[in-house]
Amino acid sequence: MLSISITRTTSGFDDIALPHYATEGAAGADVRAALTASVTIPAGGVAMIPTAIAVHIPDGYEMQVRSRSGLAAKHGVFCLNAPGTIDSDYRGEINVILANFGKEAFTIERGDRIAQLVVAKYERIVWKETTTLNQTERGSGGFGSTGKQ
């Protein structure tokens, strides 16, 4: 099991739970809003929501910020750049960009679960420029080229 160091970036939010897995099989840990007052995102609006936490992600890993399916399905509220990436060398506060694609304003309260955090291993690569690529049956076909099904 991977260990990630976490710290609170702002005092006064000790009552807000640290990221937590809702079920035994959950891949994403719910992260909560660290607000002193509620924030309302109008329909079509965007807001940056603080979490009052920072993390130390080991080299070779990233932390992805993802939408919560319940917020998306029930209210049309998504993480705008999901999955957003928190790099291993970032030590600042995690903020979540939420966009309201719903038809009504959506209000976020202190401590509400606003996103999920997923840690993933990644590989750094060396780009090797070439003049040709090996051919495949698909070739350069994209965006629907393999059919509707």
Image: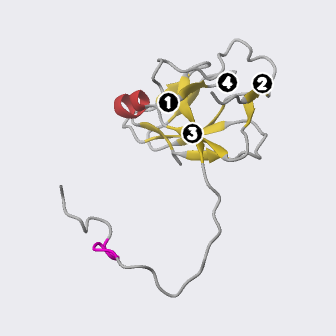
Of 124 and 43, the residue lying toward us: 124
Q: Earlier in the sequence, mark 4 or mark 3?
A: 4
User: What is the distance, in whole Å, between disc 4 and disc 1 at their CAs?
Assistant: 22 Å
Q: Quadrant of the C terminus?
A: bottom left
Separation of residues labelled 2 and 3 (CA atoms): 18 Å
Tag 1 or tag 4, which sits nearer the N-term?
1
- Amino acid found under the numbered disc labelled 2: Arg
Task: Tell me the element at label 2.
Answer: strand
In primary-sequence order, the first of circles 2 and 3 is 2
Q: Tell me, yes or no, whether the highlighted magenta stretch contains residue 135.
A: no
Gap between marks 3 and 1, in whole Å?
Answer: 12 Å
- The residue beneath circle 3 is 65
* Residue 73 in the image, given as x and y percentages of width and height: 35, 32
Residue 8 has which mark?
A: 2
For disc 2, the neighbor class at 10 Å (few under 14, some 14 to 19, many from 20) is some
Q: Position of residue 33 (x, y in %)?
A: 62, 25
- Tag 1 residue: 27
